[in-house]
Amino acid sequence: MMMKLFVALLLVPLVAAFPSEDFFPNPQAEPTPGKHWGLLVAGSNTWDNYRHQADICHAYQILHKNGIPDENIVVMMYDDIAYNSMNPTKGIIINRPNGPDVYHGVLKDYTKTEVNPKNFLHILSGNKTAMKGIGSGKVIASGPDDHVFVYFADHGATNLIAFQDDYLYAKQLIATLKKMHTENKYQKLVFYLEACESGSMFLKLPKDINIYATTASGPDTSSYACYFDGKLGTYLGDVYSVKWMEDSDKEDLTKETLEAQFKIVKRETNTSVVHQYGDLKLDQETLINYQGNGGQGSVPGKPFPPSPLNAINSRDVPLDLLFRRYECETDPVQKRKLMTEVANMADKQSVVHEILYNLAYQMTDGDATMTDMVLNTRGRGVVNWDCFTASLQTFSDECFSMTELPYAYGQMHVLANLCDLTNCKTTEITLALKVACP
């Protein structure tokens, strides 16, 4: 008996020194040196584009909750949604059906026409001098030890993303990112991009400058809006965007990696094919290093009950919303007026195809093979930028404002192809557009 007691006493300190299974913590994110920054941008305005600003407001709540201080977050949005005359719940923006208000507390660093490509590039690259006296004046003042997260939501076309009536071209974005790398403006940078044909913005992103990007769609397809709300009469979110944010809402960001989130979003975004670009080795890092303040703890929220996506091609949203308003209208006079507006918009979409088909036919001298190539080749990186930008601006000025008719964005590859795949001169294309457009 005494011997057993002696052995038991000997084992006590060994047992005490060996932790139980519950003692071992789950793998956590290693604290990263430097600061963490977030740049959140909704390029659009108007009630029909409600979803873009809702996406950005939601993203702000994620970054704020996970510890990025407000002085390190810059928000660019037009800010015409929360108190819009069409908003029955003034001061509230939601990003899913019956969802929480995502507008409260959101920073408004740059609003209205301050949201433009020139300012975006200055802010991203930390140019305080250029932003002096504009909005809050805040920029991404990051350095060689810092992590930067950029999220943009708006319309897009081949090799461009939109800022209301202006455009940011892939060439400009890539040049700025390369310059930032050369000037040691960041240690690592992650870019999430919500736009149609968004993959085309990163076709020429180098793989060796510590930048990892994911996009809502490839270089040749549309992204999709979702969560139509009958009470608000608009779409509340975009599929790719709500999928990554609803994942971040419910997960422990100190454990989930960029790769894990990409795979989840790619699987659940079945309306378009989500792509990734750049330095894919970065996807092994945890989300807290980009959507949070590094090693800080992350508090997962409760997942929302599933809601029907009611997804639709983003470029079809204006016509869809107009037709829904027509269907809901009970006043006969207003109903006839809306029916006329529906017919006019549908006609404009047909005219876009007619103008660009005739242009392609004319510029290729009626060669059937060349015409078909110009009309149907998609997903290329633009080569002749001067020609493309001049032709696109002429189309926007002389034919249709793509802000008013986003459907036209889907046909801008025709202009890129005329510039790159034929012997047409820029002046020939722009002159033909001026003649052809109503």
Image (cartoon, rainbow, N blue to C red):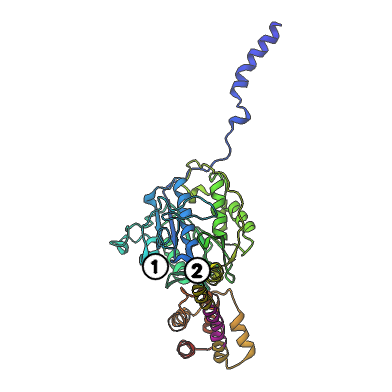
Q: In the image as oriented, which residue stretches furthest toward the left?
A: 133
Q: Is residue 2 left or right of residue 258?
A: right
Q: Position of residue 191 (x, y in %)?
A: 50, 59
* Whether residue 175 can be seen here: yes
Q: Position of residue 358 (x, y in %)?
A: 56, 89
Camera-side residue: 357 or 321? 321
Q: In the image as oriented, which residue stretches furthest toward the bottom?
A: 365
* Whether residue 412 can be seen here: no
Q: Residue at x 47, y 67 (%)?
A: 174
> Which contiguous range is marked in magenta?
343-357
Residue 220, picture quadrant: bottom right
Q: Position of residue 26 (x, y in %)?
A: 58, 38
Indicate the amino acid at tag 2: His
Would you say residue 146 sits in the magenta stretch?
no
Camera-side residue: 121 or 195? 195
Residue of label 2: 155
Q: Residue at x 60, y 54 (%)?
A: 307
Q: Residue at x 62, y 57 (%)?
A: 308
Residue of label 1: 116
Q: Which mark is residue 61?
A: none
Q: Secondary structure at mark 1?
A: loop
Q: Is residue 20 above or below residue 293?
A: above
Residue 179, picture quadrant: bottom left
